[in-house]
Structure formats: C-alpha cells, structure tokens
Image (cartoon, grey):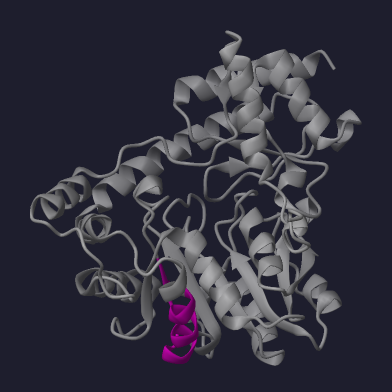
Amino acid sequence: MKLPTERMKKIPFIGIREIFEKARSFERQGKSIIHMEIGRPDFDTPAVAKEAAIKALKEGFVHYTSNYGMDELKRAIADKLKEENKVEYNPDDEIIVTTGAVEGLALAMFGLLDIGDQVLVPSPCFPAYTNQIKLAGADVVSVPLKIENGFKLDIEDLRRKITPKSKMLVINSPQNPTGSVLEKDDLEKIADFAKEHDLFVVSDECYERIIYDAEHISIASLPGMQERTIIVNACSKTYSMTGWRIGFVASTPEIIDSMVRVHQDVTTCACSFAQAGAVEALRHGRSAVEAMVKEFRRRRDLVVKYLDQIEGLEYVKPQGAFYVFPSIKNFNMGAEEFCDYILKEAGVALVPGNAFGDYGEDFVRIAYSSSYEKIEEGMQRIKEAIAKI
C-alpha cells in the first residue's frame, strides 16, 4: 500500500510545529530557549468556566449533545452575536457548536465547496485555510497582503484574482500572522465585491476581542452580507480555552444544513462538559478578557519598542491578535535561515513567514503570548543577535 496518497502529498505539516520541535531539541540539550513561536494565550481559563465544567462532570453531563450543540450554549452564542456583533441568528438552526474554530473552518470548506472550485485566500494566512481547501478538492487562489498597505486586503488585488470558478473568499480580522484589522471601509469594499461576484465569505473572527487600536466589525453585519457569510469563532483565544476545543459557526439555515452534515460524520458533537464551561465563559467571563487584553497591549508595546531599535527590520504595528510580522528582506536571508540563526544564536524561537503560505518568504512571525519578562529577554536577545549579522 503506497502512502501518502496523492491528495495528502499536497498537505504539508504546519511549519509552526516544526520550529517548536527544533526549539525543544535545543532545550533537551540544556540550552535556554524563549518561545515566541506558539500563538496561544498564556493565561488561565476564567474560573467560572472551569467551575461549570467540573460541576457538569460531577453531575454526569458526560454524554452526547445534539449535533448542533447544547441548547444553552447556542443561546449564549446567539446573545453574544446580537450584543457584540450586531447580527441576529436563530440558535435552533443557524448555529453549530464545533470542536474548535478549526473544525468550523473545515465544515465550511467541506460543506460548501465542490471539486475544482476556487477560493480566494489573503496570504500570508493561517495555514489550515489552504490545507482544508486542498483536502476538499478545491483550489487555493492566494491574494497578497502587502506591508506597504498595512497588510490590509486591497480590492484591486482581489479583482486581479477573480475567475468564473471563484466560489468563496476567506477573511480573518484581526489577522494571523500580521495583526492587521479590517476596518469598516475595508469591509464595505470587500462586501460589495462578494455580492458582485456571488461569493460565500468565511469570516474568521477568533481574535475579535484581542484588539487595540481599532474596532472589530463583523462583515455579516453589513447590508446584504449575512445571507452569504459564515462566521467562524471560538472560545480558544478570547477566553484562553485553547485546549477545551469549543468553537462555533453561524450562518443561514441553508448553509448550516450543509455544514452540519459534515459535522455529524466527523465529530458528532463538541465535548459536552466543555460546552457547559463555555456557557459560563460567554455569560460571565468578560472581566477576565479585559484584563488579558490590557496585558497583551502592554506586551505589544514592548515588542514594538524593541523593533524600533533594530536597524533593518520593517514592520507594521499590529492592531490586534498577539503577533507582529516584520520584514527581514534587508538581511539577505530567507525566512527559514533567519529563524534558524535566531534560534541558534539567541535561543529565541520564531516562525518563518513562509509557514503561512504565499508571500511570506521575506517575513517572520513574532508571537508575544508569553510573559512580559520572557518577551523582554527574548527581544533583547534578538536585538543583540541581529547586531552581529
């Protein structure tokens, strides 16, 4: 039996994990490594969520829920979307609780795409987008995000990439890996483009609450967009619940019907007692989020302060998420070579930009999702290592 299959040959391992394993190998040799490659909040989950999950376990809430998810959680999600995002969804047939946002993305790709369809993907991007599109048998059409545009999606670049086979557009704001945020005028242009070309829009809003110098607006809230938009979100980043694997999607009944058919045969339902915890996070976890975002802003400002001191690095100040994506083109090194150098010379793990798909070769991603003290030490080490180049 010959493996991998032709389809799986197109799916690489995500480069973030590769650099993580390299860093771990240095740690096993006794080298001090500062991890600035992994993008996850280092905060604890809000206590109310943990207590609710423990209570659910003790009370025997350990069995399947509906494929669509726990009724109380879907109502909490609907309330959140109405209050924070200005969009109304019926919790009975317009929301699915998923096993993290990654499954939510997969439901959209497998539920809505046919073989040979094309998907417009602003790039560099979260690698799961392109991998899932390929797994669905569709084709990725990368649209460049340019540093000179602040990593904002340029409508003219979209127009150059559209074809009769284009069926879907993926957007992500705040964006991984650049930290850019699509503001209202950006979204209005994208909305007009999507309506003009009759595109589904998958809107990844996982970092919506981790935002500093802008306002998050869901594209589904714009006129004529709710009917063609699939909102993908999760508790993972907002409530530091990455290991709980609770996400959700929201869209029209017709779109949700296609997606739940995939969900029922992939995961059946999200973890029942984790869903119980997520209800309390959504209902009562806001103060913990505000404290976390305040600290992320402080860390962002620290990283930017150091970047301003490093000659040759170009960057755009991130407006959201917990990443900055500086250009290294002035150092005449590829992204992987640069990250290897920083890892060996400085003991700091960064991610090469090409791990995020097309147009990332001249960049690296720095994640400021570890402690302030670790970030300060890491940035000082990076500064000293670059001074030796």
Residue in view at x 65 percent, y 89 percent: 195
> On the rendered structure, is 44 left or right of 98?
left
Residue 351 visible here: yes
The residue lying toward the viewer, choosing from 330 and 11, is: 11
Residue in view at x 78 percent, y 48 percent: 360
Residue 349 visible here: no
Q: Which residue is situated farthest in the left direction here?
A: 59
Answer whether residue 95 is magenta in the image: no
The residue lying toward the viewer, choosing from 328 and 94, is: 94
Q: Which residue is situated farthest in the top direction here?
A: 30
Whole-percent x, y for residue 266 in the image: 46, 68
Q: In the displayed structure, would residue 19 be above or below residue 235?
A: above
Q: In the displayed structure, would residue 332 be above or below residue 226?
A: above
Span of residues in magenta: 248-262
Residue in view at x 68 percent, y 46 percent: 13
The quadrant of the rendering that contains the N terminus is bottom right
Whole-percent x, y for residue 97 in the image: 36, 69
Q: Quadrant of residue 15?
A: top right
Residue in view at x 49 percent, y 64 percent: 103
Q: In the displayed structure, would residue 197 be above or below residue 359?
A: below
Answer whether residue 259 is magenta in the image: yes
> On the rendered structure, is 270 left or right of 133?
left
The quadrant of the rendering that contains the C terminus is top right
Q: Which residue is situated farthest in the right direction here?
A: 332
